[in-house]
Image (cartoon, grey):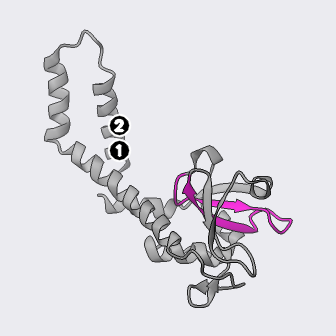
Amino acid sequence: MRLFLLTATLLFAFAAHAAPQQDRADDHHADTLVVDKGLMSQFHQVRQTVVDRTSDLVVTAIGFLGVPYRRGGNTAETGFDCSGFVRAMYTQTVGHLLPRRAEEQAAATQKIDRSELKPGDLVFFNTMRRAFSHVGIYVGEGKFIHSPKPGAQVRVEDMSGSYWSRRFSGARRVAAAQDEIKASGD
């Protein structure tokens, strides 16, 4: 799959950055090669699968807005704590079982830079005087969804708010889920 993506990327780069003096016949040949080999449709199919799964994850999570916080909770019927919520969303939409506790989820996922965040990635915070003591799911545009604390409900919050920005511990990507998503496009 990685070879396919690399090949498709190189073909697109070749077509997009072809030398100006290259004649139209060569351009047409490269375009025809991509279409004849079915690379364009495969590329779009893989891309759409990733988008659909990520969208499903975020849409599913949004569907749980208002579910009450419950320490140790991991179902909508009983309520969720932060890591139980994240675990349930990944299990239901991607079929990937994450560890139970926030710090374990951080350890089991791929570290990414905050600037690389995409919807469905995990965001971690230091809310108990230790890194990775709280987790949520990034939904885009600097916002995340989580089950915050006793007496509260699943909600969306802005990461740039002073409380959350001071406590940000890191961002992670669920690599195994991304690999499963890529594999389903094969």
Amino acid on which disc 2 is placed: Thr
- Asked if labels 1 and 2 touch by Cβ distance under 8 angstroms, the answer is yes
Q: Which residues are magenta?
A: 118-140
Tell me the quadrant of the picture where the C terminus can be found. Answer: bottom left
Q: Label 1's element?
A: helix
Residue 129: say if magenta: yes
Q: Front-most of 138 and 66?
A: 66
| Coordinates of residue 73 in the picture (x, y in percent) | 65, 85
Residue 132: say if magenta: yes
| Coordinates of residue 49 in the picture (x, y in percent) | 34, 58
Name the residue that disc number 2 marks: 9
Relative to 175, residue 31 above or below: above
Relative to 131, residue 90 above or below: below
User: Is any atom of residue 182 visible in this view?
Assistant: no
The image quarter containing residue 72 is bottom right
Q: Residue furthest top?
A: 21
| Coordinates of residue 181 in the picture (x, y in percent) | 39, 61
Q: CA distance from mark 2 to mark 1?
A: 6 Å
Q: Residue at x 61, y 75 (%)?
A: 99
The answer to whether residue 161 is left or right of residue 5 is right
Q: Front-most of 158 and 58?
A: 158
User: Is any atom of residue 16 visible in this view?
Assistant: yes
